[in-house]
Image (cartoon, helix red, strand yellow):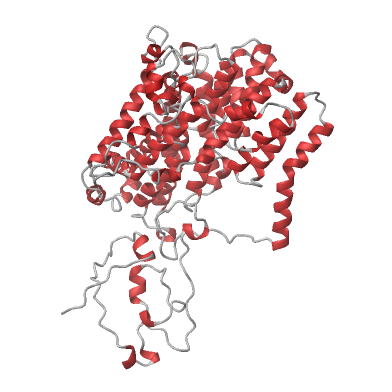
Amino acid sequence: MATPQKKPTGFRAAAHLPPNPQHIPLQPHPPINPAACNQSQLHPWCHSSSSVNYSVPLQQASQQPPISRNQEPNTTQTTFPFMENPRAPLLPVQNGSSAPRRPPKFHLPANAVLVTKYLTLLSGPLACLLVCLLAPVDGAGRSMLAAMAWVFLWWLTEAVPVPVASLAPLFLFPILGIASAETVARSYMNDVISLVIGSFILALAVEHYSIHQRLALNITLLFCGDTPNPALLLLGICATTAFISFWMQNTAAAVMMMPVATGILQRFPEGAAAPPPVVGFCKAVVLGVIYSAAIGGMATLTGTGVNLITVGMWEAYFPEARPIGFATWFMFGFPLALLCFLALWGVLCLLYCPHGGAATSLSAYLDRNHLRRELEGLGPMAFAEKMVLSVFALLVVLWMTRSITNSIPGWGSLFHVHVGDGTVSVSPFFWKTLFLTFDSHACACMQILMATLLFIIPSGKQEGEKLMDWAKCKKLPWGVVLLLGAGFAIADGVRSTGLADLLSAGLGFLRSVPYLAVAPLVCLVSSTITEFTSNNATATLVIPLLIQLAPSIGVHPLLLVIPGAFGAEYAFLLPTGTPSNIVGFSTGRIDIKDMLMTGLPLKVAAIATIAVLTPTLGEST
């Protein structure tokens, strides 16, 4: 009886290698008797792990000759992204010597690393001390400026993890006399924070059941005809990424879509063997994914943290004003995102997509049947997937209809405006909120409403198993929640201490700027700052200043806040501008020059879009 063939394990099974082009069947290895073999005749699999390269592709491993006694062992190994950085997305492995290589990292001596670490760690306290001693500000404003210096330096240098630095206001504000501990703690849990938690849990459910992969393959098949059109295929990939980014954070959308995109690109030749049209199209796909994730996050309130920070600060500064709900944001954000998306597609097609006869060079590598086989490999949509989509669709409908217009109040009016978008996605005592609508503190008890259903509805796979359990929620990004809470705490402190009035004086030059030039100028300033700091940190710093500046120049605050908020999302030029840019840069298919060539015209188009929509569509919404 023949020995059964063993399935590859370890890196061989995880690498997702392309099918054997020669269609050579793998023969089972005959039984080996070590006692009957001398050392020089041993099979390669009998050698120790230090002499055999297990990280090479499967075909190459099966073709390696035996290693003699005097032969130097081959220790060259293919580097996987997750071996250098465990947090890097698991992208398809690039095999062969033609794969793009990153330059070797520069390693500092151990003592230099320790000195740098301690300097960055002490930068926050030292900056706080210097501001307290030297800043020409009196009273609580000086204390608030010192606390901001501490927090922002830790954010920028990452002397401690960003979530840990986001906890600093909880001890700095009471110590410096800015606010009580109870007041600061309230900033870390409000309707916006609960909205974020609910959105994250739903996004984890979508990711767990691979709904995003099914959606991506369906849309790719829709745009990939019998004769593939590179521009239409690029449009399908970018549109899918943007749509996913509507409902989850930009980085999560980029991480989820990049393996799908690079899986398509894996069919193309790489390195010197790749013709220029193929190289350009690969760059267009990677750039399209990261920029589409950023643009898609502009459309909805839950798309990115900047949107939530903006709404939270607006409600904190103007509690009596009409709140900015999900539908209100969508009425302005979706047209803006659509125009920016079309500009992105046009720039990518103009710079990278092959035209005319060059486009046919891609047809040999894009197999519609292979895409269909990948979709069939996912199997039919199971009951659990259908229920997750149903809960998600119900949540979107409730978000869109809570508050529609002034004449059509929406279902939120039935609860005396005591519910918000976060109440839909979160509220631990939902039924208490439902019946005690006259209790103004009912909605303060926030936890998951729609997300709670995922912990109740059975999955249909095993008896007692639900769609979600808490073990799956351990990946919930609490760091983002803490970062948002720190932003709200800083905004409250800037307002309560009067520091915003002092800082807004530095933007006094806007008083002499023409009315129609205010929005693009504010957007330009904000988009420049965000290239060197995180989007959320830029919004936290800029938006309170713009709110305080608006009355002094005689304009509505939203005329400054909206361009400043969207400008904080225009991090298109550098890989460090936003984590989603790093996701694309880590694939090795693009470099900084490509980002500058694409991001600069895209940023100009996005600022021009803000300049047109803010005084027109913004007035009506």
Instruction: Examine the rendering and report whether any part of residue 526 can be seen.
Output: no
- Residue with the most extreme top position: 407
Q: Residue 92 in the image: state x and y as whole percent.
A: 39, 55
Q: Position of residue 313 (x, y in %)?
A: 57, 22
The answer to whether 250 appears left or right of 549 in the picture is left
In the depicted view, which residue is nearer to us: 347 or 560?
A: 560
Is 316 positioned to the left or the right of 495 in the image? left
Location of the N terminus (image quadrant):
bottom left
On the question of residue 87 being in view, the answer is yes
Q: Quadrant of residue 31?
A: bottom left
- Residue nearest the observer in this picture, 90 or 518: 90
* In this view, 549 is above or below 269: above
Q: Is residue 167 above or below residue 308?
A: below
In the image, taking residue 51 as reference, residue 227 lies left or right, namely left
Viewer-side residue, 173 vs 320: 173
> Residue at the location (56% across, 36% down)?
482
Whole-percent x and y of residue 329? 45, 21
**Which residue: 43% across, 80% down?**
48
Residue placed furthest toward the left:
1
Give the number of marks: 0
Task: Tell me where residue 573 sits by quadrant.
Answer: top right
Examine the rendered structure and indicate whether residue 367 appears above or below residue 342: below
Q: Position of residue 37 (x, y in %)?
A: 34, 91
Q: Residue at x 27, y 64 (%)?
A: 21
Is residue 119 found left or right of 297 in the rendered image?
right
